[in-house]
Image (cartoon, rainbow, N blue to C red):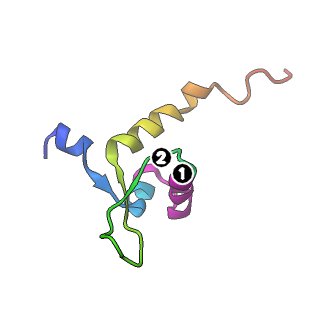
């Protein structure tokens, strides 16, 4: 699989959780809140959703929330 294919790869919520070192419920909350774009790949009329997330969207979210992008929580406090 080349880099372009890997960027467009779709992942399950459990795969995303493993990738970022989190848990399924946290990833589901990101999707539910709109923080992490996702789509339902279940066929019409299916009783259960089949949520998938693009690898590139996960990587973008992780870049956005790196500590260096938000500053050190200890900065700005009293010394």
The residue carrying mark 1 is: 30
Could you give the CA–CA distance between mark 2 and mark 1, rounded to whole angstroms? 5 Å
Q: Are marks 2 and 1 in contact (CB under 8 Å)?
A: yes
- The numbered dot on residue 66 is none
Q: Secondary structure at mark 1?
A: helix
Q: Secondary structure at mark 2?
A: loop
- Location of residue 29 (image quadrant): bottom right
70 inside magenta stretch: no
Tell me which residue sits at (50%, 53%) in the image.
Answer: 31
Residue 74 at x, y percent in the picture = 74, 28
Q: Is residue 18 above or below residue 50?
A: above
The first of marks 2 and 1 along the sequence is 1
28 inside magenta stretch: yes
Q: Residue furthest left?
A: 1
Q: Residue furthest front?
A: 45
In this rendering, the count of numbered labels is 2
Foreground residue among 64 and 68: 64
Residue 59 at x, y percent in the picture = 39, 39
Q: Which residues are magenta?
A: 19-32
Q: Residue furthest right?
A: 78
């Amino acid at each position: 699989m080349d880099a372009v294919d890997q960027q467009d790869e779709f992942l399950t919520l459990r795969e995303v959780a493993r990738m970022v070192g989190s848990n399924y419920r946290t990833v589901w909350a990101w999707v539910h809140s709109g923080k992490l774009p996702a789509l339902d790949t279940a066929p019409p009329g299916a009783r259960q959703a089949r949520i998938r997330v693009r690898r590139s969207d996960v990587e973008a979210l992780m870049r956005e929330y790196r500590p260096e992008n938000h500053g050190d929580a200890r900065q700005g406090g009293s010394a």
